[in-house]
Image (cartoon, grey):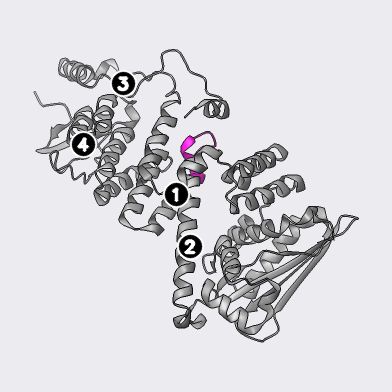
Amino acid sequence: MKWKWLAAFLGVLFFAGCATSPYGPAEKYLDKKEYDQAIRTYLKLLEPHMREGKRFIYYDREGVTGIGTVYWHMQRYQTAAKILKMVVDKDPGYGKALLYLGLSYEGMGNEDGAIQTYRNYTGLGSQDLYRQVLSGRLDWVIRNKIAREIELALKQEAQLDVSTYPDKSVAVLSFLSLSENRTWEPLQKGLAEMIITDISQIKDIRVVERLKVDQLLSELRFSTSGLADESNSLRFGKMVGARNLIKGSYLVMDDMKMTLDAGIFQSGKTAVPTNFSFDGNLSRLFQMEKELVLSIINYFGIVLTPQEREKLLRIPTENIDAFMNYCKGLDALDREDYKNATRFFQNALQNDGNFELARDRLVMPEIWEVTHSQNVYRLSLEVVQWVNQMPRGKAQVAYKPPPELLSTYNRLQLMNRQQSAGFLPGNDSRKSFQEASITGIQLLPELLGEPPKPPQR
């Protein structure tokens, strides 16, 4: 596979004197599937040493993640997860550890743990390749989970009872466009997605994934208008997992004025729905959406703190063209048309470079393809190849203590470390943890607050 697209996308510049990984020897053993030797080599490079009668190694996120990755390749997922979770707790923005922690959870059958881990992609920098990889894998895991939930609901429909669901469980349906001009049809999914994104911030409300709502409607061959029927809404509500259904419509007129209407229906009840209606110029679309969200929250009797309200009222973009491209991207993504999805999200960011929702969805088509695969080892292999095309930055300089700490003993210790490891991370990253067993490799770290003291003379 060619990687030119990656270099162009990231604007890669290779600096003279780029540092190679100090863990190259361990990675070679991993490539040859010599797992025990790979682990021993990682540990050796992390400089095992004795302190107060206990054995320790220095903490370096790349090295410890490497050990976790070896265990993942060995399919020892629980051990891998334990090691990688420790790295993620210390370095939550380290994409490689997040990826293999998520893959370890997948191997353990812990789908929710994988989803929670992959959601952390938003904390990675926009130029971090792992951000896209985690986002793509998150989408794949959610799709598979939804497909299984729908299949199970169809099989167990007779046993499902909507009264067992939380009172504040909600499914938001795609909005219905009443406009004759089909230009505005993409807003159908975009509005629903914005509402879901907003009310998902409220911990007391359980919101169903939009993709699950749309796929179940398709599976049952229901239309949004068909859910006005009591039996249909009851059946849909208990299968989608929500007591409340939010349906809405909008009309954009030729003079760019619009109306936005929505109603909250209780699944299977004939009671008149609670309706909300807003109108104004199209430029007020985002303010109207926020007003609708506040109305929904008020309907459930939830009182927001000033901080929650401030966060909720943040408008992701005020650029209609950017939002329209975002909506088109969502539709393409639902159809698994990754090439056009990427194009639309890129267009949205060109319209508004600060549109974070579009940035969160922006994944290169090649990454969509490889992350949407049952073959996790192919995913691992190709991600390694992608990352190896990236520069590691300028060569890092080994830590050199100030002159006052350079006793004869410390000089000898420093020389020994530099010769055995060949590379030292910066001083700030050199934290030690206890290694419970260097042969069994059960890394149960105990962080130390103080560096080792020089021997008494």
- Between residue 15 and residue 231, name the one nearer to us: 231
Q: Identify residue type, mark 3.
A: Tyr
Magenta stretch encompasses residue 126: yes
Tell me whether the residue at label 3 lies in contact with that at label 4, contact meaning CB atoms closer than 8 angstroms.
no
Q: Nearer the viewer, mark 2 or mark 3?
A: 2
The span shown in magenta is: 120-131
Quarter of the picture containing the C terminus is: top left
Marks 1 and 2, how far apart in space?
Answer: 19 Å
Query: In the displayed structure, does residue 18 sit left or right of residue 61?
Result: right
Question: x%, y% of residue 14?
Answer: 48, 18
Query: Residue furthest toward the bottom?
Result: 270
Mark 1 sits on what residue? 118
Picture quadrant of residue 172: bottom right
Disc with the residue nearer the chain's start (2 vs 4): 4
Question: Mark 4 = which residue?
Answer: 35
Q: Residue at x 48, y 82 (%)?
A: 161
- Answer few, some or many: residues within 10 Å of disc 4's Cα (few below 14, many 20 plus, some between 14 and 19): some
Residue at label 2?
Answer: 147
